[in-house]
Image (cartoon, grey):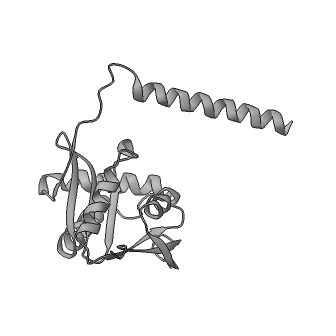
Amino acid sequence: MQALLQARNARTANRRAESTKMRLSAPGVPMPTSLAIVEYRAEFRVALVTLWRDSFALGVGAPVPNSIDDHLRFFDEHMLTETRVHLALRDDTLVGFGAFTPDSVVQLYVHVDHLGQGIGTRLLDLAKANSGGKLWLCTFVTNINAQRFYERHGFAVVARGFEPVMQLGDLRYEWRRAAR
């Protein structure tokens, strides 16, 4: 019985993979236009916080516990004053953002419809380039995709903790530029 279930699951996975390949390579499907990474522009404020909330909920598996107004206020009072915020734009549409200091990746989110397109990598590369050769960040233990992403980009877990607002465990990651 178990062998039958494994065979069926393998066939389903193969069909799903073939379906994805066909969609990505089908003639007439336009490739995504180029991506621009720019300094924060106020016209994207609400779109940014909405993207942040949606991406957070998908990655963490729980909604943001604060109201949108509180989240906007937090963005204005903390992100804009304590970090450099960069936008990832495709055709003047916000598809991701990063909020960085020279020492840390404070926030990095990609629109849920644009995951896996290299947007997070471009933003993270910018943070690395503007760092002093090392960065730290935190992510929730439930955000497995973020963990894989950061580990693929050279970050390693250095501490485990607990975030009281979300009542979730979190991981502290660090990255150091390789010695030349």
Most foreground residue, 28 or 108: 28
> Furthest residue to the front?
180
How far from the left and from the top, in percent, is residue 88?
Answer: 23, 51
- Tell me what residue is drawn at x 28 percent, y 58 percent: 123
Tell me residue 120's x, y (percent).
34, 55
Question: Is residue 63 or residue 38 the one in the foreground?
Answer: 38
Which quarter of the figure has residue 117? top left
Taking the image as shown, residue 103 lies to the left or right of residue 42, namely right
**Residue at x-position 68% and y-position 29%:** 11
Using the image as rendered, state which of residue 139 and residue 29 is in the foreground: 29
Residue found at the very far top of the displayed protein: 27
Q: Please indicate whether residue 79 sits to the left or right of residue 62 in the image.
A: left
Image coordinates of residue 98 in percent, x first then y, are 27, 61
Please name the residue shown 53% across and 59% down the image.
Answer: 144
Q: Residue furthest right?
A: 1
Left or right: 63 in relation to 101: right
Q: Position of residue 168 (x, y in %)?
A: 53, 70
Compared to residue 2, the image places residue 118 above or below, namely below
Q: How many numbered markers are drawn?
A: 0
Q: Can you say which quadrant of the picture contains the N terminus?
A: top right
Horizontal side of residue 73 vs 165, given as left or right = left
Q: Quadrant of the C terminus?
A: bottom left
Viewer-nearest residue: 81 or 176: 176
Which residue is at a point 29% across and 55% down the rendered structure image? 122
Whether residue 69 is visible here, answered yes or no, is no
Residue 140 seen in the current view: yes
